[in-house]
Image (tube, rainbow, N blue to C red):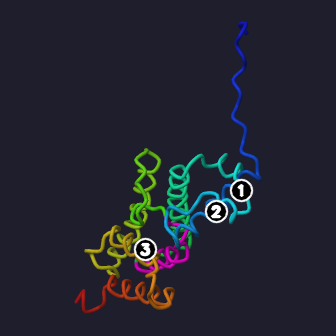
Amino acid sequence: MPAGDSPRRRPRAERRDAVANREKILRTAADLMAVRGYHVPLTEIADAAGVGVGTFYRAFPDRSGLLEELQRRGYDLLLTTLGRIKADGLTGADAVEAYLQECLALANQLVAMPLRGGEPLADAAAVEAKKRIGAAIGDFLAEGRANGSVHADVTPLDVIVCGTLIAMPLPYGPDWETTARRHVALFIRGLKCTPDDVS
């Protein structure tokens, strides 16, 4: 090996405690931001997550980096959800209903998504993730159209918008979970074809 050259070091895998701390920070930040907006003090997020400020800033150098990672994590959560629904064998309206119920369960964790006001990420991985989400929902709808159980004019964007809206509680409204579940039921009822629709 020529003098002055050194072997290339492989990047070390992130330590298990660092991964756990990162996840705690992201989950806590999402919960706080869903209630109070994107400008919650970062030191307050660190304190609520039970980590030191130094640990926080090692993982996320600034607010923009935190919001970007929350958005990436949101895409990952939705893709995992869609994969699980497909693996369960659900199709058509049943698959869409399961997806919407999961959006409601994940509500706070999706706070940084573009339709919730997050700055859309433009890198290739984020763009691909969005395409995969739309394609998976499109597959569910196509299966429903093929067996005559879903209206032909329903689009993946319709489903994505519904999933976004039910995950955003009205600040002074009634019990939100009850209200959101009612809206999911109404949306699914409107999405489904009835015998009269196809006769």
**Kind of residue sitting beneath label 1:** Asn
Mark 2 or 3, nearer chain start: 2
Q: Secondary structure at mark 3?
A: helix
Residue 44 disc label: 2
**Kind of residue sitting beneath label 3:** Gly
The magenta stretch spans which residues? 93-111
Q: Which residue is drawn at the image coordinates 73% and 58% (left, top)?
A: 51
Q: Which residue is drawn at the image coordinates 45% and 82% (left, top)?
A: 171
Residue 30 disc label: none
Q: Is residue 85 found left or right of 131 in the rendered image?
A: right
What secondary structure predominates along the stretch shown in magenta? Answer: helix
Q: Residues within 10 Å of mark 2 (few under 14, many from 20)?
A: some
- The verdict on residue 83 being magenta is no
Q: Which residue is mark 3?
A: 163
Q: Residues within 10 Å of mark 3 (few under 14, many from 20)?
A: many
Q: Is residue 45 found left or right of 112 in the rendered image?
A: right
Q: Secondary structure at mark 1?
A: helix
**Kind of residue sitting beneath label 2:** Glu
**Residue 61 pos. (x, y %):** 59, 46
Q: Which residue is drawn at the image coordinates 73% and 51% (left, top)?
A: 18
Residue 21 disc label: 1
Q: Residues within 10 Å of mark 1 (few under 14, many from 20)?
A: many
**Residue 95 pos. (x, y %):** 46, 76
- The verdict on residue 100 being magenta is yes
Q: Does 128 appear above or below 46?
A: above
